Amino acid sequence: MIVVSGIQPTGRFHWGNYFGAIKQYVELQDQADASYYFIANLHALTTVRDPEVLRRNTIDAAIDLLALGINPDRATLFVQSDVPEVTQLCWLLMTCTPMGLLERCHAYKDKKAKGLPADAGLFTYPVLMAADILAYDADTVPVGEDQIQHIEVCRDIAGSFNHLYGEVFVMPRAKIMEKAARVPGTDGEKMSKSYNNTIGIFDDPKVVRKTIMRIVTDSRPIHEPKDPETDHLFQLYSLFVGEKEREAMAARYRAGGFGYGEVKQALADAAEKYFAEAREYRKELEAKPQFVREVLGDGAAMARKKAAEVLARAQAACGIKYA
Ligand code: ATP
Ligand code: MG
């Protein structure tokens, strides 16, 4: 199994990013034959327009990922732009990508529907993503359910290239972690940087607690029994605790007679405990910038080696290598 996945440095990581993506990265690095995890700074360029912010976010993302358990001895961790072969491959794929395929993609469609200006970078975003996946012969792409469409697009593009030029690319598959496929935000909608409803993984625990207190709940009287399965506060709590605690909380929901404030406190305690070790390790990493740079340098070298091999294969197949 060859795993690849990227995460954008568009802001600090939140619970949705962790349970929807990063946690799986950590689990898969031990199961996979090879895993490639990259910080998608080229993709982020379609939204982050402040160079200083992009630089800072990129480093922060690397530190966060290491703190959360990406092990550079097991996984290849690197920054997208450090592998120029991917952007070269992107062009080859672009010539096999029907316009209609991209016009149907959510990110672009949603922005257009809102009347927001969309650049060609946003429009062709899924093609760069396809290049990111195909460049490493990956067969498994761990993602949240919002990314399924983009994996389908990647498969379509790989399919048309292969149809034209022979079996050049490996067909990748999305790997969704069902339980956490959609982590709700403070308003009950999907947690997302763009919706301003996030809870940060490495925010100060006091700030996290305050944010949790702001989570929107229904206003039914406290003595009424509630269905835990449809409650987003319960869904969040479930992410941080084991089966026993989850069941105990579910029983309290069904029995009624308590307030959401209690659940929020329990959630804040559980979350603080859950990320305590990562928070400590993050502090250590923050004090070792040279180590982080080395990890990214080594990761890029490894990734380039593989991407160069796949690029050469694709170039040979389509006649770009002429000598
Ligand atoms: P944006 O609002 O800019 O799209 P985001 O907060 O949705 O940002 P992304 O960079 O799009 O974050 O997502 C990074 C990874 O985290 C992706 O694999 C995505 O599927 C996953 N992810 C993001 N939000 C959630 C969520 N609420 N639940 C589950 N997975 C999520
Ligand atoms: Mg998103």
Image (cartoon, rainbow, N blue to C red):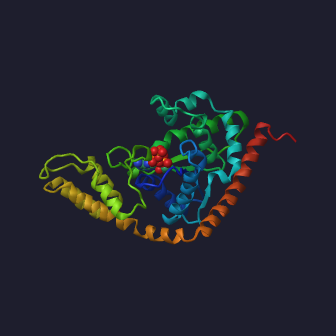
Quick check: can you spot residue 143? no
Depth check: 28 or 91 in front? 91
Q: Is residue 304 left or right of residue 63?
A: right
On screen, residue 55 above or below 219: below
Q: Which residue appears at 53% of the width and 59% of the height? A: 60
Q: Which residue appears at 39% of the width and 63% of the height? A: 204
Residue 36 lies, in percent from the top left, at 60, 56
The quadrant the C terminus occupies is top right
Depth check: 217 or 208 in front? 208
The quadrant the N terminus occupies is bottom right
Q: Quadrant of residue 280?
A: bottom left
Q: Which residue appears at 46% of the width and 29% of the height? A: 113
Q: Residue furthest top?
A: 100
Depth check: 240 or 282 in front? 282
Q: Which residue appears at 68% of the width and 52% of the height? A: 83
Residue 77 lies, in percent from the top left, at 60, 59
Quick check: can you spot residue 292? yes
Residue 129 lies, in percent from the top left, at 59, 43
Q: Residue furthest right?
A: 323
Q: Quadrant of residue 299?
A: bottom right
Q: Is residue 142 left or right of residue 187?
A: right
Residue 295 lies, in percent from the top left, at 62, 65
State how many labels appear: 0
On screen, residue 168 above or below 99: below
Q: Is residue 200 left or right of residue 101?
A: left
